[in-house]
Amino acid sequence: MLVMKTKAFLKLMTLCLFSLLPITLCVAQDMESFTEIEGIVIDETTKTPLIFADLTVGNSNVSTVTNSDGEFVLKIPNSHLNESLIISYLGYQDKTIAIKNFKTDSKIELTPSYTELNPISITSINRSARELVIETLKKKNSYIDKNTLMTAFYRETIKKRRRNASLSEAVVKIHKEPYSSYKNDHIELVKARKNTDYSKLDTIALKLQGGPFCNLYTDIIKYPEYIFTEEDIKDYDFSYGESTQINNSLIYVVNFKPKKHIRTPLYFGKLYIDANTLALTSAVFSLNVENKELSSQMYIRKKPRKVDVYPTEASYRVNYRISNGKWHYAYSNISLTFKVNWKGKLFNSVYTLSSEMAVTDWELKDTKLANIRSQLIRPSTILTDKASGFSDPGFWGEYNIIEPEKSIESAIKKIQRQLKRT
């Protein structure tokens, strides 16, 4: 068995050495009637799909994101059918559509929002890129400052080269502490399902450790210590990139990368910072995995002795959403590619492990953790050890999920047919 620690933050991984199974909680949901809409978000000019576009129902906290094909499915409570659907994407103008006028399988075209490059917009900041990042990480008052109960959809997949081998999905409740608090967030598992075709995994069974916590900890504002610690932030170079827009607001783009003399695996990427509030709106970054030995130690918890495993790519993304003037964690995804070499064998195997989590609803609430502590999952969770199969056709009820890619849908159907034959 090969156990992957799906988050490359070294200090976190020292806490995740053993696999402790979560206790599953089945929660009855208020079955309010809803209307389901679906469509695709594309670029107005190029007609290419826009991945991870944000869709929010006006005057509510109901939301979702598009998948890697630009597609979405959104379940809207009928009490909100007179509202509008707001579609936003970094570098594009927002679009608002009345839900009652929404057409089935609609193509939503977004117009690029071009920003005139004015040197004043950068020089007027009166601080270096490094100083801006440090101030952004400290500026907690731009984010929700109360206990928040979030409903989120989580998915993790394993591919051997280009073939889907495993898919696990879950609906979770995130008990999010105020951003100003040093307390860690908690996650409650509501529903989970999985399907695995072990014939595609050779003689190795891959498991991802961390589950939804891996994605939750990409919330850089809540957990800055997992990427920019006080000790290692000096090991990075920061510089300004070309500005962009979101929600008609100017966004500063800050590039970061490790200094040339650094050999320890560190991150490189881009931070998108709102010019008015100095809030982090999104971040896209990767781990430098050139040092195979050290980067492997950061990810691999358990493996056979005759196998060498090392990452060839590790990419992360986190998006934030603003509501009532306050920002909060909204979506993140992680993509890790590993090369597996059996000693004495000529050929190797390549596996890609991906996970994503999207907040689909939330409310400010006293979550009273003391009453549900026995039902919380741990940061060392292996989701596939607790999830069941795909046998329940009405599994997700009225929960909003990320519409799966066609390739994943096909893989699930194929596995189901094999199970029926068996």
Image (cartoon, rainbow, N blue to C red):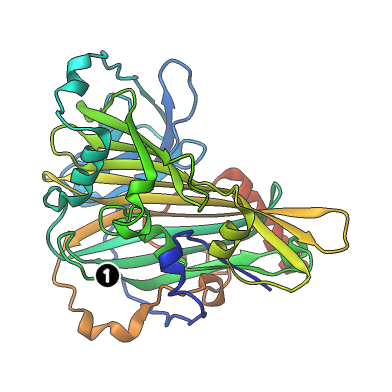
Q: Position of residue 91 (x, y in %)?
A: 33, 26
Residue closest to the eye, 103 or 340 = 340
Q: Is any atom of residue 398 visible in this view? A: no
- Left/right of residue 378 with respect to residue 88 in the rendered view: right
Mark 1 surroundings: few (<14), some (14-19) or many (≥20) residues within 10 A: few
Residue closest to the eye, 33 or 47 = 47
Q: Which residue is found at the position 33% from the left and 45% from the top?
A: 319
Q: Three-letter amino acid code at disc 1? A: Asn
Q: Work out which quarter of the rendered image holds the N terminus and state it.
A: bottom right
Q: Position of residue 77 (x, y in %)?
A: 26, 52
Q: Which residue is found at the position 48% from the left and 30% from the top?
A: 49
Q: Name above or below for residue 222 compared with residue 2.
A: above
Q: Position of residue 359 (x, y in %)?
A: 32, 54
Under circle 1, the secondary element is loop
Q: Which residue is found at the position 36% from the left and 42% from the top?
A: 283
- Quarter assignment of residue 275: top left
Q: Name above or below for residue 367 compared with residue 265.
A: below
Q: Work out which quarter of the rendered image holds the C terminus and state it.
A: bottom right
Which residue carries the number 1 mark? 184
Residue closest to the eye, 81 or 119 = 119
Pick out the residue farthest to the front.
261
Q: Is any atom of residue 254 visible in this view? A: yes
- Quarter assignment of residue 99: top left
Q: Position of residue 148 (x, y in %)?
A: 19, 63
